[in-house]
Image (cartoon, grey):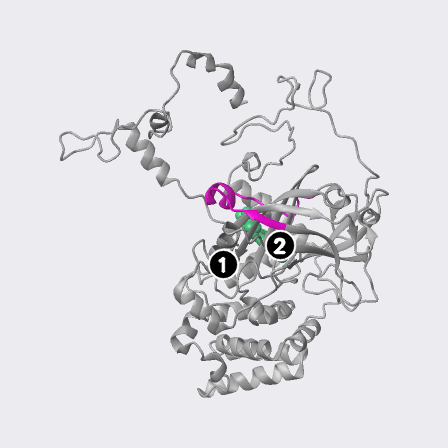
Amino acid sequence: MLENITSENESYLQGVKPLTTEQENTLTNRQGHPVTNNQNLRTVGNRGPATLENYDFIEKISHFDRERVPERVVHARGAGAHGYFEAYGTVGNEPVSKYTRAKLFQEKGKRTPVFVRFSTVIHGGHSPETLRDPRGFAVKFYTEDGNWDLVGNNLKIFFIRDAVKFPDMIHAFKPDPVTNVQDAERFFDFCSNSPETFHMVTFVYSPWGIPANYRMMQGSGVNTYKWVNSEGKAVLVKYHWEPKQGIKNLTMKEAAEIQAVNFNHATQDLYDAIERGDYPEWELFVQIMSDGEHPELDFDPLDDTKLWPEDQFPWLPVGKMVLNKNPEDYFTEVEQAAFGTGVLVDGLDFSDDKMLQGRTFSYSDTQRYRVGANYLQLPINAPKKRVATNQSGGQMQYKVDRAPGQNPHVNYEPSILGGLQEAKQEGKEYTPHVEGNLVRQSIDRQSNTKQAGETYRRFEQWEKDELITNLVNDLSRCDSRIQAKMIALAEEADEEYGRRLREGLANAEKGGSSQKPLGNHGGDKAMEMAVEL
Ligand code: HEM
């Protein structure tokens, strides 16, 4: 709309001489007035005082005063890049249409533009990228049917399985509200009293908790979604990204060494790789399960603290993603990017996973606060193809989402006066049957430690050693009741895991930790620096 206003009225510029290059590069304020003196305030005499009618200064300083929007409440530190997703048209050896009618997957070689934001989770916008933390892996696909966001992490599971626990979990992991220092005791207080966290703790305290950079890590949708085909039939799916660059994780010592010289290393690595044309790539895999509760499994398919065993549910490739363009402006594109688990296209659906449903409310809610009511009109968030809504108003409305030919007086529906019409349902509508009593209950088949034991046994020796060292380092500073609960969980998961943790903590308490040779490579100082969660 604004574009129209300007072009229709541009006739007033007729007869005005085109600007020379020098004039085009001239500084103006936001009203388009040339700024002739950007060094001195307008003052009474050259020693002041200043005057209040000084528009240029007040515009400049008050915009500066508002340069920050609230940072993300989690995943505040991030880096982003543009690229494309290329479909294989198949899922494993079968046509993908057997399982989903989502258009972006159907044709071999079909490309869909994407924007990706990688992140750390707990600390603020300028925190070191070497910290022990899951990493965010959020992808926005600008499809022909509108946007699809796949908001995932590098690890394939999560700490908790019920969205109502998320604010408590994040409070426990973030710095103490009094000291503003992150505290292992608060972290383990929450985790030891929420045993479903133990599998994720096992990953996060191993080297998998410090990926070497963003290019050499996996991604995963973590939660269970659905695929719906043209007959309206659904299956359960999990998504996983596999880096073509390989996977690399860091020991505590390596992380401390990097952090001592560069705490932006992951952002820089991604930016530099794309600048030199070394475009990172990931292959997208899905695991598929028939829709249902699967009583034969010892876990619930909707439980995001569990891996779906690969031998029963193989990873099936569906396409690849290439990141080949850096953002032109960090704030415009990366900071204002807004991803959400509710952003799905036809052929993709939610499962009943309670975490996923809680997340789906939370993302757009926080973005209306963080970026503003019209955050979806920003170019980074807007679908590339078309938007036509009757929504209008709110802070920073930039345009009306009007369709060409739409009667501008009709901003409602239904109407016979030329307003927007409802879209036709494509394919058979998916109408799952839901019934049950409303309850507040956790799921059955919790099996909180079994997969943690399997994960521990799959680790290579150096990964097991790092895990024990890192846990001992942080747990040795915790209340003995918390230590006892964590040891009990480790013992339940795996005999060796439990024994090593018990022994490590006993020795650490005596002051002569058997883990010292492992944990001490970087020297005590470096270890202290790196012993963040
Ligand atoms: C960011 C909520 C679980 C991955 C966020 C944000 C919120 C949030 C409020 C900030 C969004 C913004 O300001 O734009 C929640 C809630 C969860 C949950 C309530 C559980 C109930 C998860 C899980 C994953 C995840 C399980 C991994 C699969 C991410 C990522 C971002 C994010 C990657 C950053 C997106 C970006 O780069 O902008 N989450 N989250 N979250 N969350 Fe979650």
Residue 67 x %, y %:
40, 41
Residue 378's place in the image compared with 134, above or below, is above
Residue 472 x %, y %:
52, 79
Residue type pointed to by label 1? Ala
Q: Residue at x 75, y 41 (%)?
A: 103
Q: Nearer the viewer, residue 479 or 528?
A: 528
Residue at the far front: name it: 277
Residue 230's place in the image compared with 396, above or below, is below
Residue 393 x %, y %:
54, 28
Residues packed near mark 1 inside 10 Å, few (<14), some (14 to 19) or many (20 plus):
many
Find disc 1 in the rendering and name its residue.
266
Q: Residue at x 49, y 31 (%)?
A: 396
- Assess whether residue 343 is covered by the magenta stretch: yes
**Label annotation for residue 485:** none
- Assess whether residue 509 is covered by the magenta stretch: no
Range drawn in magenta: 322-344
| 531 with respect to 104 (left or right) | left
Q: Earlier in the sequence, mark 1 or mark 2?
A: 1
Residue 76 visible here: no
Residue 100 x %, y %:
79, 47
> On the rendered image, what quadrant is the N terminus found in?
top right
Kind of element beneath mark 2: strand
Residues packed near mark 2 inside 10 Å, few (<14), some (14 to 19) or many (20 plus):
many
Kind of element beneath mark 1: helix
Spatial CA span between label 1 and label 2? 16 Å
Residue type pointed to by label 2? Glu
**Label annotation for residue 281:** 2
Residue at the far right: name it: 231
Front disc: 1 or 2: 2
Q: Nearer the viewer, residue 57 or 432?
A: 57
